[in-house]
Image (tube, grey):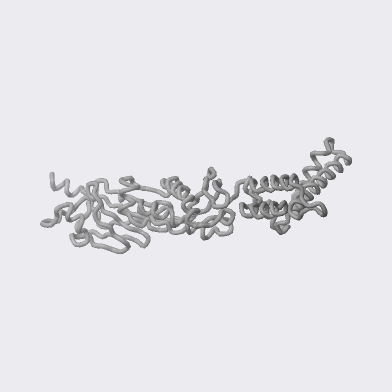
Amino acid sequence: MALMDFIKKQFIDILQWTEGTDGVLAWRYPMAEFEIQYGASLTVRESQMALFVNEGKVADVFGPGMYKLTTQTLPVLTYLKNWDKLFESPFKSDVYFFSTRQQVDQRWGTQQPVTIRDKDFGAVRLRAFGNYAYRVADPKKFHTEISGTRDSYAVADLDGQLRGLMLQHISDAVAASGIAFLDLAANQIEFAKQIQAATAPSFEALGLKLETVTVQNVSLPEELQKILDQKIGMGMVGGDMGKFMQYQTAQSMPELAKGAGGGGSVAGDAMGLGAGVALGQVMAQQLQAGLQGGAAGGVKPAEVMATLEKLGELKAKGVLTEEEFAAKKAELLKKLA
C-alpha cells in the first residue's frame, strides 16, 4: 500500500514561470500534492526572481539563471528543514516567482486640491498629475509586506496604495525643490525629481524601487490665476500705476459695456464704455498724482491717503509685493514732507 501511494505521488523535475499576462507581480507555483525531487531544475528567466518559503518562513532567493536544487543551492531551506544529516527527497516547499520588469505608465493625480505652503502666496491649493514607473526590487520584503500567500498578486491590486504614496509626498517635494509655486509649471522636470526623491523610501519599504516620475501638468487655482494675470499686466506697463489702471480699464471695458447698457441698446453700450473710460481716467489720475505730485500746489494729504488705500488693495490682492508697496508708500510720504 505504501508503495502504491509513493507511485501515485507526482514529482516536479522543473520549476519555472512563463508569464502569461501582463501586470502580475507575484505568482505561486501550484504545488497541490506535488513534491520536488532532489536535483530538480529551477529556471528563473531574465526580469524574474524566485523565492522558497518553508512553513511560512522565507528561505532562499534566486535571481535569473538555471539551478540544480541541492543542499548547496538551498542553504537556508536546508537549515530550516534540518537537512544537515540527510536530504529528504522528495520534499515540499512553497515557491513564488516575482516579475522584476518595470511597471510603466502608472498614473497619479490629485483628485482633490492639495494644500501646500508657498513663499510668495502662503497657503496654495495645488492640482497636478503625471505618471511613474516601478519594479519589484526585494522579493523577500515584497512577499512579507505585500503579496503574502496569495496565489498571485497584480499591479492593479497595488495601484491605490502607490498612488496614495505619490500624493502624500507632494508637499515635501515642493518644499525640498525650493521652487516658487508660480514657477512649478516651468520646472516640471525638477519638480518630478523632488517627488521621486521624497517618495522613493516609501516604495523601498514595500520591496519596490521607484524608477521614474513625470509631471505632466501643474494647474493654478482660479483665484491665483487672476492674480498672476494682474502681475503680468503690471509687468507689461513697466510698473507704472497710471498705465496699469488704464490697462485694467481696457480689460474690463467689455464687461462694463454689458452691465451699464441695461437693455443692450447702442446708447446703453456707449454709456457703459464711457463709464469705464472715465473710471480708468479718474483712478489713473489719482495714482499718478500721488506718485508724481500736483502740478503747482503740491500734493494734498487726502489724495496721498486715497492713493495709499488703493495701493494697499493692490497689495492685498497680490498685484503688488510687500517690497513694491513699501517703496511706493515711502515715495508718497516723502512728497508730503
Q: As drawn, which residue projects farthest toward the top?
A: 263
Task: Tell which of 295 and 111 is nearer to you.
Answer: 295
Give the percent coordinates (x, y) of residue 283. Answer: 77, 47
Task: Tell which of 212 and 43 is nearer to you.
Answer: 212
Q: Name the residue located 30 percent from the left edge and 45 percent from the top edge.
A: 149
Q: Name the residue located 67 percent from the left edge and 45 percent from the top edge.
A: 313
Give the percent coordinates (x, y) of residue 275. Answer: 83, 43
Can residue 233 be seen here? The reply is no
Counting the numbered discs, the total is 0
Q: Would you say 228 lies left or right of 164 here?
A: right
Q: As drawn, which residue projects farthest toward the right?
A: 267
Task: Tell which of 332 and 71 is nearer to you.
Answer: 332
Image height of 70 relative to 219, above or below:
below
Give the percent coordinates (x, y) of residue 19. Answer: 38, 55
Give the percent coordinates (x, y) of residue 298. Answer: 78, 52
Task: Tell which of 276 and 337 is nearer to you.
Answer: 337
Q: Quadrant of the N terminus?
A: top left
Can residue 51 be seen here? The reply is yes
Q: As drawn, which residue projects farthest toward the left?
A: 85
Q: Would you say 264 lies left or right of 327 here?
A: right
Q: Name the residue located 83 percent from the left edge and 36 percent from the top edge.
A: 262
Q: As drawn, which residue projects farthest toward the bottom?
A: 65
Q: Name the residue located 22 percent from the left edge and 53 percent from the top edge.
A: 36
Q: Would you say 327 lies left or right of 19 here?
A: right
Image height of 271 relative to 71, above or below:
above
